[in-house]
């Protein structure tokens, strides 16, 4: 799993979900990091914080889509607007999750993603 870095406790919270399931979490601090990690590691999904000042989230998705069109992506956004939701739909984003992130909702979306894409219930309760 690949997630965006953040200035808040986001990576630590994700590790609390992933570690008990044996899922490795890699954290990327820039668009270039996302592309480099995806190119060099087996990544099953990405989680991108659209509010990060370190990179442009939609540009990151566009770049990922150009190289890895089937890579499942989840987006996090504080109060997503219609334009963002429309663009996320156009780019084939799996889910847009409102911030602050409810970890139960995130886990449900990860479960849906992994069952649908990989036939795995690793995130089921």
Image (cartoon, grey):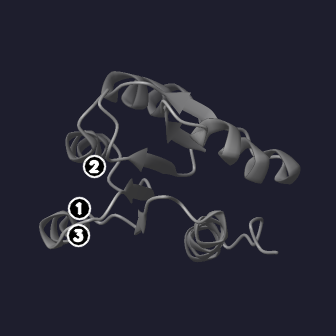
Evaluate if marks 3 and 2 touch, with contact meaning CB atoms under 8 Å apart: no
Find residue 107 and report its image quarter: bottom right
> Circle 1 sits on which residue?
91
Q: Which numbered disc flags the more N-terminal residue, 2 or 1?
A: 2
Residue 20 percent location from the top left of the image: 87, 50
The Cα atoms of the two marked residues, 3 and 2, are separated by: 16 Å
| Residue in the picture at 74% in, 66% down | 123
Quadrant of residue 30 within the rendered picture: top left
Rendered location of residue 29, percent (x, y): 43, 24
Figure quadrant of residue 74 = bottom left
Residue position for label 3: 85
Identify the secondary structure beneath mark 3: helix
The residues tagged by marks 1 and 3 sit, at their Cα atoms, a distance apart of 10 Å
- In the picture provided, is 92 more to the left or to the right than 6? left
- Sequence-wise, the earlier of marks 3 and 2 is 2
Whether residues under marks 2 and 1 lie with C-beta atoms below 8 angstroms apart, the answer is yes
**From the viewer's perspective, is 91 left or right of 14?**
left
Residue at image x 29%, y 31%? 53
Residue sitting farthest toward the left? 83
Tell me the element at label 1: loop
Q: Is residue 67 above or below residue 123?
A: above
Compared across the picture, whether 16 is left or right of 80 comes to: right
**Dot 3 alpha-carbon crowd within 10 angstroms: few under 14, some 14 to 19, many 20 or more:** some
Q: Answer few, some or many: residues within 10 Å of disc 2's Cα (few below 14, many 20 plus, some between 14 and 19).
A: some
Judge depth for marks 1 and 3 and give the one in front.
Answer: 3
- Residue identified by numbered label 2: 65
């Amino acid at each position: 799993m690949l997630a965006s870095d953040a200035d808040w406790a986001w990576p630590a919270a994700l590790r609390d979900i992933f570690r008990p399931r044996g899922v490795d979490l890699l954290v990327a601090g820039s668009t270039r990091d996302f592309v480099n990690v995806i190119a060099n590691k087996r990544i099953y999904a990405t989680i991108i914080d659209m509010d990060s000042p370190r990179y442009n989230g939609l540009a990151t998705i566009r770049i990922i889509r150009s190289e890895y069109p089937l890579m499942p992506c989840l987006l996090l956004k504080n109060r997503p607007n219609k334009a963002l939701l429309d663009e996320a739909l156009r780019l084939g984003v799996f889910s847009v999750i409102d911030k602050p992130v409810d970890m139960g909702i995130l886990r449900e979306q990860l479960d849906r993603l992994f069952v649908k894409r990989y036939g795995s219930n690793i995130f089921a309760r």
